[in-house]
Image: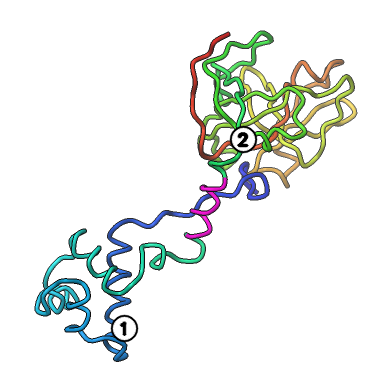
Amino acid sequence: MTLFLPEIVRDTTERPRFRDLRRRLLSRIRVQVRNGEVTERRLARRAGLSQPHVHHLLKGIRSLTANSADALLEGCGISVLDLLTENERADIYQLEAASRQPRTGVKLLAEPVGEGSSWSGEPEYAATIQVACRALWGAGEPLAVLARADPEMEAPQRVLLIDRALGPRLFPESRTLYVVTHGRDTLVRWVRLGLRHVYFLSAIDRNRPDRWMRQPLPRDLSSIIHARVHAIIADGIWPLPDKS
Protein backbone atom coordinates (compact mmCIF):
# COMPACT_ATOMS: atom_id res chain seq x y z
CA MET A 1 0.00 0.00 0.00
CA THR A 2 1.55 3.28 -1.08
CA LEU A 3 1.27 6.74 0.39
CA PHE A 4 -0.67 8.28 -2.47
CA LEU A 5 -3.80 6.17 -2.45
CA PRO A 6 -6.11 6.21 -5.50
CA GLU A 7 -9.08 7.05 -3.26
CA ILE A 8 -7.32 10.26 -2.19
CA VAL A 9 -6.55 11.50 -5.69
CA ARG A 10 -6.86 9.92 -9.07
CA ASP A 11 -3.51 9.53 -10.76
CA THR A 12 -3.38 10.79 -14.31
CA THR A 13 -2.52 8.26 -16.98
CA GLU A 14 0.38 8.68 -19.36
CA ARG A 15 -0.61 11.26 -21.92
CA PRO A 16 -0.29 10.32 -25.60
CA ARG A 17 2.45 11.98 -27.62
CA PHE A 18 2.29 13.26 -31.15
CA ARG A 19 4.00 10.15 -32.51
CA ASP A 20 1.31 8.01 -30.83
CA LEU A 21 -1.49 10.02 -32.45
CA ARG A 22 0.29 9.90 -35.81
CA ARG A 23 0.62 6.12 -35.55
CA ARG A 24 -3.04 5.76 -34.58
CA LEU A 25 -4.19 7.94 -37.48
CA LEU A 26 -2.23 5.98 -40.08
CA SER A 27 -3.33 2.66 -38.57
CA ARG A 28 -6.96 3.76 -38.68
CA ILE A 29 -6.71 4.82 -42.32
CA ARG A 30 -4.95 1.58 -43.30
CA VAL A 31 -7.81 -0.42 -41.77
CA GLN A 32 -10.39 1.66 -43.65
CA VAL A 33 -8.54 1.18 -46.95
CA ARG A 34 -8.12 -2.53 -46.33
CA ASN A 35 -11.83 -2.92 -45.51
CA GLY A 36 -12.86 -1.01 -48.62
CA GLU A 37 -14.42 1.85 -46.67
CA VAL A 38 -12.34 4.37 -48.64
CA THR A 39 -9.75 4.31 -51.41
CA GLU A 40 -6.44 6.08 -51.40
CA ARG A 41 -7.57 8.16 -54.39
CA ARG A 42 -10.82 9.27 -52.72
CA LEU A 43 -9.02 10.04 -49.45
CA ALA A 44 -6.38 12.04 -51.30
CA ARG A 45 -9.07 14.08 -53.04
CA ARG A 46 -10.87 14.80 -49.77
CA ALA A 47 -7.62 15.72 -48.03
CA GLY A 48 -6.29 17.87 -50.85
CA LEU A 49 -3.21 15.69 -51.25
CA SER A 50 -1.86 13.73 -54.19
CA GLN A 51 -2.68 10.05 -54.38
CA PRO A 52 1.03 9.01 -54.55
CA HIS A 53 1.74 11.10 -51.45
CA VAL A 54 -1.06 9.40 -49.51
CA HIS A 55 0.19 6.01 -50.71
CA HIS A 56 3.72 6.76 -49.50
CA LEU A 57 2.40 7.92 -46.12
CA LEU A 58 0.41 4.76 -45.59
CA LYS A 59 3.35 2.59 -46.65
CA GLY A 60 5.67 4.42 -44.28
CA ILE A 61 7.88 5.63 -47.11
CA ARG A 62 7.32 9.24 -46.08
CA SER A 63 6.93 10.69 -42.61
CA LEU A 64 3.62 12.21 -41.65
CA THR A 65 4.00 15.93 -41.03
CA ALA A 66 1.63 18.03 -38.95
CA ASN A 67 0.14 19.62 -42.09
CA SER A 68 -0.42 16.25 -43.74
CA ALA A 69 -1.92 14.88 -40.54
CA ASP A 70 -4.38 17.77 -40.38
CA ALA A 71 -5.28 17.19 -44.02
CA LEU A 72 -5.91 13.48 -43.44
CA LEU A 73 -8.03 14.21 -40.38
CA GLU A 74 -10.09 16.58 -42.49
CA GLY A 75 -10.34 14.02 -45.27
CA CYS A 76 -11.52 11.34 -42.82
CA GLY A 77 -13.96 13.71 -41.14
CA ILE A 78 -12.52 13.10 -37.67
CA SER A 79 -10.63 15.06 -35.04
CA VAL A 80 -7.76 14.33 -32.69
CA LEU A 81 -10.29 13.38 -29.99
CA ASP A 82 -11.35 10.43 -32.15
CA LEU A 83 -7.78 9.09 -31.91
CA LEU A 84 -7.79 9.04 -28.11
CA THR A 85 -8.74 6.09 -25.96
CA GLU A 86 -11.76 6.26 -23.67
CA ASN A 87 -9.51 6.72 -20.62
CA GLU A 88 -7.54 9.50 -22.30
CA ARG A 89 -10.71 11.37 -23.19
CA ALA A 90 -11.97 10.94 -19.63
CA ASP A 91 -8.73 12.46 -18.32
CA ILE A 92 -9.14 15.48 -20.61
CA TYR A 93 -12.73 16.01 -19.53
CA GLN A 94 -11.71 15.66 -15.89
CA LEU A 95 -8.95 18.25 -16.22
CA GLU A 96 -11.31 20.58 -18.08
CA ALA A 97 -13.94 20.23 -15.35
CA ALA A 98 -11.30 20.78 -12.65
CA SER A 99 -10.16 23.98 -14.33
CA ARG A 100 -13.69 25.39 -13.94
CA GLN A 101 -13.97 24.61 -10.24
CA PRO A 102 -13.81 27.52 -7.79
CA ARG A 103 -10.44 27.80 -6.08
CA THR A 104 -9.05 29.46 -3.03
CA GLY A 105 -5.61 30.21 -1.66
CA VAL A 106 -3.80 27.90 0.78
CA LYS A 107 -0.48 28.67 2.46
CA LEU A 108 2.48 26.55 1.33
CA LEU A 109 4.97 25.81 4.10
CA ALA A 110 8.54 26.85 3.37
CA GLU A 111 9.97 23.75 5.04
CA PRO A 112 9.19 20.43 3.33
CA VAL A 113 8.50 17.22 5.21
CA GLY A 114 10.69 14.19 4.88
CA GLU A 115 13.96 12.81 6.14
CA GLY A 116 16.16 15.61 7.48
CA SER A 117 13.26 18.05 7.90
CA SER A 118 12.10 19.44 11.24
CA TRP A 119 8.66 20.75 12.24
CA SER A 120 8.44 24.30 13.50
CA GLY A 121 5.81 25.45 15.98
CA GLU A 122 5.84 28.80 14.18
CA PRO A 123 5.97 27.82 10.52
CA GLU A 124 7.17 30.05 7.71
CA TYR A 125 5.37 30.18 4.38
CA ALA A 126 6.92 30.10 0.93
CA ALA A 127 3.88 31.08 -1.10
CA THR A 128 0.14 30.77 -1.49
CA ILE A 129 -1.18 28.19 -3.92
CA GLN A 130 -4.63 27.89 -5.45
CA VAL A 131 -6.56 24.74 -4.51
CA ALA A 132 -10.04 23.59 -5.54
CA CYS A 133 -12.49 24.61 -2.82
CA ARG A 134 -14.08 21.18 -2.69
CA ALA A 135 -10.69 19.66 -1.78
CA LEU A 136 -10.81 21.64 1.48
CA TRP A 137 -14.09 20.15 2.66
CA GLY A 138 -13.68 18.90 6.22
CA ALA A 139 -10.31 20.59 6.80
CA GLY A 140 -10.25 22.92 9.82
CA GLU A 141 -6.78 24.45 9.41
CA PRO A 142 -5.59 23.53 5.91
CA LEU A 143 -2.00 24.04 4.79
CA ALA A 144 0.02 22.80 1.85
CA VAL A 145 3.45 21.23 2.22
CA LEU A 146 5.98 19.64 -0.08
CA ALA A 147 6.63 16.00 0.84
CA ARG A 148 10.00 14.76 -0.30
CA ALA A 149 10.29 11.41 -2.06
CA ASP A 150 10.08 8.69 0.57
CA PRO A 151 11.23 5.14 -0.30
CA GLU A 152 9.77 3.84 2.97
CA MET A 153 6.35 4.97 1.78
CA GLU A 154 7.02 3.99 -1.85
CA ALA A 155 6.08 7.56 -2.68
CA PRO A 156 7.47 10.15 -5.12
CA GLN A 157 7.75 13.82 -4.26
CA ARG A 158 4.31 15.42 -4.07
CA VAL A 159 2.47 18.37 -2.55
CA LEU A 160 0.20 17.43 0.35
CA LEU A 161 -2.84 19.22 1.68
CA ILE A 162 -2.67 18.81 5.46
CA ASP A 163 -4.97 19.77 8.31
CA ARG A 164 -3.51 21.03 11.58
CA ALA A 165 -6.88 20.97 13.39
CA LEU A 166 -6.43 17.76 15.35
CA GLY A 167 -8.74 18.63 18.25
CA PRO A 168 -8.06 18.90 21.98
CA ARG A 169 -8.03 15.11 22.42
CA LEU A 170 -6.06 13.34 19.73
CA PHE A 171 -6.88 9.73 18.94
CA PRO A 172 -5.10 8.79 15.69
CA GLU A 173 -7.25 6.98 13.17
CA SER A 174 -5.73 3.76 11.88
CA ARG A 175 -6.33 4.52 8.19
CA THR A 176 -5.28 8.16 8.30
CA LEU A 177 -1.79 9.41 7.46
CA TYR A 178 -0.21 11.98 9.75
CA VAL A 179 2.72 14.37 9.72
CA VAL A 180 4.83 13.19 12.66
CA THR A 181 8.19 13.82 14.25
CA HIS A 182 10.52 10.89 14.85
CA GLY A 183 13.94 11.80 16.13
CA ARG A 184 15.18 14.66 13.97
CA ASP A 185 12.91 13.89 11.03
CA THR A 186 9.41 15.03 10.13
CA LEU A 187 7.74 12.18 8.24
CA VAL A 188 4.37 11.10 6.86
CA ARG A 189 3.27 7.89 8.55
CA TRP A 190 0.36 5.90 9.92
CA VAL A 191 0.14 5.94 13.71
CA ARG A 192 -0.62 3.29 16.31
CA LEU A 193 -0.82 3.82 20.07
CA GLY A 194 0.38 1.36 22.69
CA LEU A 195 0.29 1.46 26.46
CA ARG A 196 3.77 2.96 26.71
CA HIS A 197 4.83 3.71 23.17
CA VAL A 198 3.59 5.35 20.00
CA TYR A 199 4.36 3.53 16.77
CA PHE A 200 4.89 4.93 13.27
CA LEU A 201 4.18 2.70 10.28
CA SER A 202 5.49 2.99 6.74
CA ALA A 203 4.18 1.31 3.60
CA ILE A 204 6.90 -1.32 3.48
CA ASP A 205 6.47 -2.43 7.10
CA ARG A 206 2.80 -1.76 7.73
CA ASN A 207 2.16 -5.46 8.33
CA ARG A 208 5.42 -6.00 10.21
CA PRO A 209 4.92 -4.77 13.80
CA ASP A 210 8.42 -5.91 14.71
CA ARG A 211 9.80 -3.25 12.34
CA TRP A 212 7.61 -0.31 13.36
CA MET A 213 9.39 2.82 14.52
CA ARG A 214 8.53 3.57 18.11
CA GLN A 215 9.16 6.13 20.82
CA PRO A 216 7.91 6.70 24.37
CA LEU A 217 4.31 7.83 24.56
CA PRO A 218 4.34 11.55 25.43
CA ARG A 219 1.77 13.24 27.63
CA ASP A 220 0.83 15.50 24.72
CA LEU A 221 0.54 13.65 21.41
CA SER A 222 0.41 16.94 19.52
CA SER A 223 4.11 17.36 20.35
CA ILE A 224 4.93 14.59 17.86
CA ILE A 225 1.76 14.38 15.72
CA HIS A 226 1.39 17.72 13.97
CA ALA A 227 -1.23 17.33 11.23
CA ARG A 228 -3.22 14.80 9.28
CA VAL A 229 -2.91 14.30 5.53
CA HIS A 230 -6.16 15.58 4.06
CA ALA A 231 -5.49 15.13 0.34
CA ILE A 232 -2.84 15.07 -2.36
CA ILE A 233 -2.47 18.04 -4.70
CA ALA A 234 -1.58 16.31 -7.95
CA ASP A 235 -2.03 18.95 -10.65
CA GLY A 236 -3.22 22.47 -11.19
CA ILE A 237 -1.39 24.39 -8.47
CA TRP A 238 -0.21 27.91 -9.09
CA PRO A 239 2.19 29.63 -6.64
CA LEU A 240 1.09 33.19 -5.94
CA PRO A 241 2.93 36.03 -4.19
CA ASP A 242 2.46 35.80 -0.45
CA LYS A 243 0.87 39.11 0.55
CA SER A 244 0.90 38.51 4.29
Q: SS at mark 2?
A: loop
The magenta region covers: 89-97
Tell whether 157 sits left or right of 80.
right
Q: SS at mark 1?
A: helix
* Image spot of residue 198 (x, y percent): 80, 27
The quarter holding residue 191 reads top right
- The residue depicted at 25 percent of the width and 63 percent of the height is 70
Query: Which amino acid, mark 1?
Result: Val
- Give the residue pinned by disc 1: 31
Between residue 157 and residue 204, name the one nearer to us: 157
Tell whether 97 sits left or right of 182.
left
- Taking 105 as reference, is 209 above or below it? below
- Give the residue pinned by disc 2: 102
**Is 93 a magenta residue?**
yes
**Is 55 a magenta residue?**
no
The reply to whether the C-beta atoms of the residues labelled 2 and 1 are less than 8 Å apart is: no
* Image spot of residue 212 (x, y percent): 72, 36
- The residue depicted at 14 percent of the width and 72 percent of the height is 49
- The residue depicted at 18 percent of the width and 61 percent of the height is 65
Q: Residue furthest bottom?
A: 36
- Taking 161 as reference, is 141 above or below it? above
User: How many numbered callouts?
Assistant: 2
